[in-house]
Image (cartoon, rainbow, N blue to C red):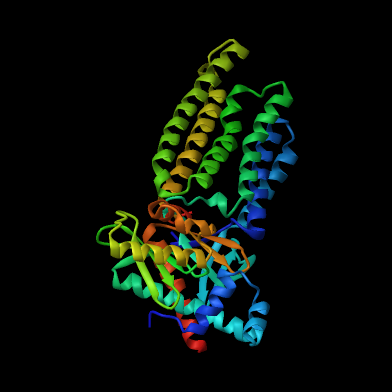
Amino acid sequence: MLKLPPRMEEILLLVYGEELREVDVAKRLSISKQAVSKALREARGRLAQIFLTIADLMYADIIRVNIEKGYAIIKLRQTKQKAYVFYVPTKGPRVIFENPINLDKNNVKLYEEIVETAIKWRILRNKNLKTKDLVKVLTELFKVVEA
Amino acid sequence: MKRQWPLPYSGLPALMSGISMICFTGGILTGFLNAPVVMSILIVLGFVFGLLSAGRRIEVVSDSVVLEYGFTRTALKYTIKDIIDVFDINELSRGNLVRYFKYHLFIFNLVIVLPIIYLILKGVYPNPVYLPILFIPVLIGIVLQLYIVFTAKNYRKLIRRVSQVLSIVWVTIGFIVGMTYREVYGKSLFTDPSATILYFIGMVLLAASTIVLIALMCKHHVVIIESADGKSYAIGTSSAEDAKKLMKHILEVIAKNAEATT
């Protein structure tokens, strides 16, 4: 329910991540352009539903849903804190908070997964960011999604 | 009062609202040039374009959002399909309207600069009691310019500081008018009843237009919708709650429509 079918993820990433035209995606996947358009429309709807569900589960209001880049910003009603939801292909949505950025072993894995996802979706454009300071990269990521 | 309405920030409505602002500014200036016919035409055109670009209503249907503009009837209709981004710009820590709607920077700058160019080129100044009216487009242009650059809630403090500075500017304009009048006419402004009335009307209009604008800017939230073809559209809402309801409604309809087509 909180994951897209693999084919839909593939099409989304080709169109919005690699920024290919629908006709080029159709050629690459040996399907019709109409099939690509239909899959995109459906994927957008499903992603919207995933983010709505996460907001509901966390008792939060939606501030932003960016279907093109696979992320959402929500604000928890109880604490007024902002949370960032990123859709990680093959794994589903992941939620992180801006403060605090806690670099213990488990969190580092999560943050690296999100940075990699952000590069795949072209939210962050510099591939060298992976090797830089994780706190700096995450701060840069929050700045980009908040603009 | 309506809770949500389309804003004339893009496409034809933006062009028409820009023309409306320039017509009103031009109308004020031609009033000083003793050209009542041209002034009347410009003011009427200002109203016409303003009414044509006024946001009328929003409808969310299947996976599209329909924006209607025009008062009292619908003059323009935009259907936004393939929505890829929806957000409340006032809630983003780095949100600013100018990133999505650059056209208005040009209009607001023009509205600020026209009265100043007029004063410089004309050489002979109008009766000082008209100065407050002349400054209305300048102050409105400054306030709107600040708003599109510093839209996020974080900047509300800045907007409040600016409004405090503008109130000092307002008082200063009042003094300048009084002093200039005395220099030009050799007597106090308040000895002439008609000049006094004009002066107070100008000062009240000047204060009211900027105060109302700032109050509305601080209360209202703007929802931005981006479509897959790279176009952005703005919707004004009466409050943060209305913005949240609108966004949730749009996303629910998109999600439902995708379900229905599988």
> For this view, does A78 lie left or right of residue A24?
left
The image shows residue A107 at horizontal and vertical percentages of 31, 63
Which residue is at the far top? B186
Please determine whether, in this image, residue B180 is positioned above or below residue B149. Answer: above
Q: Which residue is at 38% across, 83% downward?
A: A1
Q: Residue at x 62, y 53 (%)?
A: B50
The residue sitting at 45% across, 81% down in the picture is: A4
Vertical arrangement, residue B44 with respect to residue B6, above or below? above
Q: Residue A58 or B2: which is nearer the viewer?
A: A58
The reply to whether residue B66 is in sight is no
Extreme-left residue of the structure: A78
Q: In which quadrant of the rendered view does residue B167 lie?
A: top left
In the picture, which quadrant includes the N terminus of chain B? Answer: bottom left
Residue B113 falls in which quadrant of the image? top right
Who is closer to the viewer here, B28 or B213? B213
Is A52 located above or below residue B48 in the figure?
Answer: below
Identified at 45% across, 75% down, the residue is A89
Q: Quadrant of residue B130?
A: top right
